[in-house]
Amino acid sequence: MKKNILILFLFVSLSALAQRSLNDYKYAIVPVRFAFANEENEYRLNTITKFNLTKMGFEAFYDNEDLPLETAGERCSRLFVNVEKVSSLLSTKVVVVFRDCNNVEISRSSIGLSKAKEYKIAYPEALNDAFKSLFTFGYNYNGTVYKPESVKKETPKSSVEPEDTPNMLFAQPISNGYQLVDKTPKVVFKIFKTSHPDYFTVQSDTINGALIRKNNEWVLEYYKDDKPVSEKLLIKF
């Protein structure tokens, strides 16, 4: 019974967070070199990616370009675009992947394919094929702006910096999430990624719950003695 209540509790919390889509982002950031490439803009893939994003309606920039002042310091208002190679023996296949500032996948294209034998022809052809599904999506920016960094910017200069707070927890990357350690350092919790960047599942020796970002604060929610508990956590990612 307790387990079922917790599942329902977490489901309601997650449902309260709107699912993000491409339409929530105005700026798209393209690396100057993709992970599988041997050099910057190999086979003109980065140029093609930026061109097609602009054609879709995004304001696209390379990751080494200066961005508009309105997005300065607001990393989470940007969408990060990557092209990934898909293993294939008889053809060249790629997919376009969109991730947010927390590296959570927001969307991806259909797999683009080319059977051309020369890479300089095959890769651009496969990439343009992948973008066909994205053009079908019908991107239209809805005006959403995410500003999770605003709390730090609004903190008075005389306040104690988060790193100096005794109960600050520090996030260390692990597979599919982070472990949160105190200054000892001791692992206090392990949190695991979900499909939403503002929501993690939480595990420890005594707690199974959820970590949710609400109003730019991280809130730990779980059940203790069959009663819901909500605690604010200070976390340095």
Image (tube, rainbow, N blue to C red):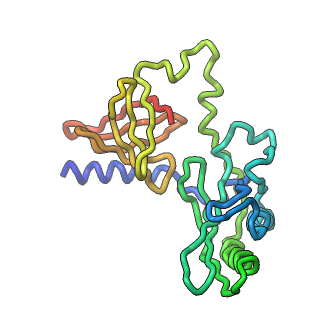
Rendered location of residue 116, percent (x, y) = 70, 86
**Residue 172 seen in this snapshot:** yes
Residue 13 appears in the picture as rendered: no
Identify which residue, 42 or 28, lies in the foreground: 42
> Residue 122, percent across and down?
71, 80
In this picture, is 145 found above or below 142? above
Asked if 232 appears above or below 157 in the picture, the reply is below
| Residue placed most toward the observer, 140 or 200 | 200
Is 209 positioned to the left or the right of 153 in the image? left
Q: How many marks?
A: 0
Where 92 falls versus 24 (above or below)?
Answer: below
Image point 62% across, 60% down: which residue?
35
Residue visible at 46% across and 36% down?
218
**Residue 81: percent from the left, percent from the top?**
66, 59
Query: In the visual, does 47 lie left or right of 106?
Result: right
Residue drawn at 49 percent across, 38 percent down: 214
Q: Residue furthest top?
A: 158
At x 70%, y 76%, the residue is 123
Foreground of the two, 162 or 95? 95
What x and y, as percent, mark residue 138?
A: 70, 70
Asked whether, in this view, residue 37 is left or right of residue 165, the answer is right
Pick out the residue farthest to the front: 38
Occupied quadrant, residue 60: bottom right
